[in-house]
Amino acid sequence: MERYRGAWRELDAALAARPERFIGFLSVPLDLEPEEIAATVEREVVGRGLHGIGELTPPPGRAAMIEPVLQAAADCGRLPVVVHGFAPTTADDLTTLSKLANRYPTVPLVVSQLGGLNWMQAVELVRDTPNMYLELSTATIVFAVRLAIKEIPDRTLFGSDAPHGDPVLTRALVERVTSPGEVRDRVLGGTIAALAGLD
């Protein structure tokens, strides 16, 4: 738990330094008992006035570990939950996430990094699961971003995976595959603003 507390302190410092620019999502430990996860979400996410939970990275083949977090998010009033989409997340994990999302239909479940190398499957699962969203960072090919936005324009989100990715290049990629207007505006900020309760 101490490694999380260090990250939480860094988040607090960033939010305090630029409250007009940043909102907070907080990762929570997945190895706690469900009641401890619920208490942590209530105290550390809701109690701090943060806007969501994540990014969660369960071990490969163990995406089901996030279920207590989804329950806590549902109990706290529709908090969005972000789950790591690239390795170590597997194709089977993406399927598990879709099944879990169906069990908690009020919780927006965001798969980050376009689902990694399993991006085609991620696009299909998100398209077919109304409360799932797809964050577009770390795309390996331009076509993946173009297809994701075409298939699920109201549930794709700009992301840069900074500091590993470059926000300017990622934004340029979204602008390259969209036309100016409503869809681009949603992808570049409108959808996440709605999920985080900022609109």
Image (spheres, grey):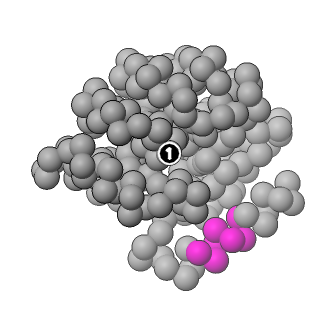
Please state which of residues 90 and 127 is positioned toward the viewer in this rendering: 90
- Quadrant holding the C terminus: bottom left
Q: Is residue 27 left or right of residue 23?
A: right
Image coords of residue 47 (percent x, y) = 62, 61
Mark 1: which secondary structure?
Answer: loop
On the question of residue 72 being in view, the answer is: no
The residue most toward the front is: 141
Which residue position holds label 1?
A: 138
Please state which of residues 177 and 134 is positioned toward the viewer in this rendering: 177
Q: Residues within 10 Å of mark 1 (few under 14, many from 20)?
A: many
Residue segment shown in magenta: 8-14
On the question of residue 139 being in view, the answer is: yes
Residue 72: quadrant of the picture: top right
Image coords of residue 168 (percent x, y) = 38, 63
Residue 65: quadrant of the picture: top right
Please name the amino acid that badge 1 sits on.
Answer: Thr
